[in-house]
Image (spheres, grey):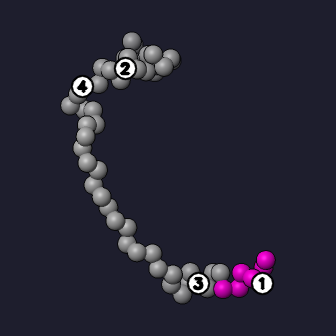
Amino acid sequence: MNAVTEPETLSELIADCALIPTTLRAGNVPLPRVTAPPWQVDEACHAQVAELDAYV
């Protein structure tokens, strides 16, 4: 393995990844659950498609 250049083969990449310290590896850490605000159609959004049938 050469730490100066990018790995050129899959086996070199695997070897490089094996050298990552365990403290830096992702474990079974639960990801934070983020909920998006509810989506709503406002007047501006509705106005963009109000005359869509005229173009189809």
Question: What span is colored magenta in the figure?
Answer: 50-56
Q: CA distance from mark 3 to mark 4?
A: 53 Å
First in sequence: mark 4 vs mark 1: 4
- Dot 3 amino acid type: His
Residue pointed to by mark 3: 46
Residue 45 in which image quadrant: bottom right
First in sequence: mark 3 vs mark 2: 2
- Dot 4 amino acid type: Pro
- Dot 2 amino acid type: Asp
Task: Give the x, y percent position of residue 35.
Answer: 34, 65
User: Is residue 25 shown in magenta?
Assistant: no
Residue 30 visible to an observer of this rendering: yes
Q: CA distance from mark 4 to mark 2?
A: 11 Å
First in sequence: mark 4 vs mark 2: 2
Q: Is residue 31 left or right of residue 50?
A: left
Residue pointed to by mark 1: 54
Location of the C terminus by quadrant is bottom right
- In this view of the protein, which residue sits in the foreground, 42 or 27? 27
